[in-house]
Structure formats: C-alpha cells, structure tokens
Amino acid sequence: MNTSFETYQRKDEWLTPPYILKALGKFDLDPCAPIKRPWKIAKKHYTKKDDGLSKVWKGRVWCNPPYGNQTAKWLSKCSLHKNAIVLIFARTETKMFFKYIWEQADAILFIKGRIKFYHNNGVQGDSAGAPSVLVAFGKRNVRALYESKIKGILIRLK
Ligand SMILES: C[S@@+](CC[C@H](N)C(=O)[O-])C[C@H]1O[C@@H](n2cnc3c(N)ncnc32)[C@H](O)[C@@H]1O
C-alpha cells in the first residue's frame, strides 16, 4: 500500500530507514532529528527544541528535512554547508529543486522503487507516496553515493 504524498507532507516524523544510513557511512550531524528516536542517526543531533536551522553546522551532515514549505530553507543551508547528503522527494520540477539541487548539488541518486519510512516508535510505514532522491553536496558525499550500492540511477552534476 502507498501512503499518499499529501499525507507525508502533513507529518514530519518520517524516519530514514537504517539500511540507507548504514550504506552511506557515518555522519557528524543530523540537524533535523526527531526528539524521540529509536536509533542514533549521527554523532550529534539537533531537534525542533534546538531549531537545527539556527545552529552552526560542523562536519558531515545527514539531512532528511521537515516537509512542506520548510524544506527549501534546509536545502539552502545544505548547499551553503557543502558537506551533506539530503534525502527528499524527487519533485524535480519545483523552484527549490532548481535553485538548490540542479544548480548547486554535486550528484543525485534517483532511488529505485519507493522508500518505506519509519515512525518514531521504530515501526516501518507503508511505501511513500512519491519517489525519493539522495543529493550529494561535496566530493566525499558523491563518493559515498557511488559506493553505497543503494539501487538507483546516479547522475553527476558537476
Ligand atoms: C522527515 S523527519 C527526518 C528525521 C531524521 N532526520 C531521519 O533522517 O530519520 C524530519 C525531522 O525534522 C524535525 N524538525 C522539524 N523542525 C525542526 C527544526 N526546526 N530543527 C530541528 N529539527 C526539526 C522533525 O521533528 C522530524 O523529526
């Protein structure tokens, strides 16, 4: 069963499947982490309580950002930080996708099939209502996408 795109947009707590994180190597920071999380995502986490957007980011960042009209701000910060992998829906036609990904990212991996994200109690949900991409900012993160063996099509942008 698919959970519709709109349903996904209405809720923030959709967690990245651990197999994706494991395939991409260790991250220093998840600046948009759930307050209640069933597993560690990075060495350091910022949650809603901290407002991860207002913080200084250091090191290699994992960013599966809040959905809806918040997403662009997170993409902007990742593009300036230049050391991040972002997981978002493949809405390749949107203004934010053009401004921060097509024009600034180093590579995109279009993931084969649809991701089943997790709830913050650790239970896996149904397939997402849209396909997803992993976006690399920085050479090291391009290499991580290449080496991840996550199924899909990788496009080098720079
Ligand atoms: C799509 S979930 C991804 C969670 C996690 N990053 C992962 O990859 O599994 C987005 C998360 O961002 C958090 N969030 C929303 N606004 C935030 C903010 N201003 N600062 C930090 N985290 C925030 C939500 O609570 C939610 O857990």
Image (tube, rainbow, N blue to C red):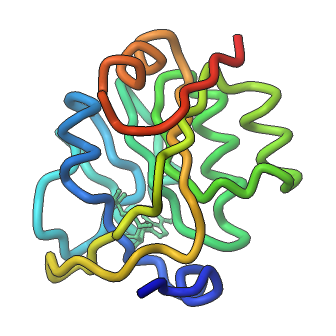
Where in the figure is residue 37, as x and y percent of width and height? Answer: 18, 69
* 112 in relation to 7, above or below: above
- Looking at the rendering, the quadrant in which ligand 1 lies is bottom left
Image quadrant for the N terminus? bottom left
- What residue appears at the point 46 percent right and 35 percent down from the top-left corner? 85
Horizontal arrangement in the rendering, residue 68 relative to residue 99 (left or right): left
Horizontal arrangement in the rendering, residue 1 relative to residue 24 (left or right): right
Horizontal arrangement in the rendering, residue 124 relative to residue 84 (left or right): left
Horizontal arrangement in the rendering, residue 74 relative to residue 92 (left or right): left
* 2 in relation to 142, above or below: below
Residue 34, quarter of the rendered image: bottom left
- Tally the numbered discs: 0
- What residue appears at the point 73 percent right and 57 percent down from the top-left corner? 91
Give 72 or 55, whichever is nearer the viewer: 72
- What residue appears at the point 64 percent right and 86 percent down from the top-left corner? 6
Where in the figure is residue 69, as x and y percent of width and height? Answer: 73, 70
Where in the figure is residue 52, as x and y percent of width and height? Answer: 45, 54
Residue 49, quarter of the rendered image: bottom left
- What residue appears at the point 35 percent right and 24 percent down from the top-left corner? 59
* 88 in relation to 138, above or below: below
Give 135 or 1, whichever is nearer the viewer: 1
Image quadrant for the C terminus? top right
* 71 in relation to 92, above or below: below
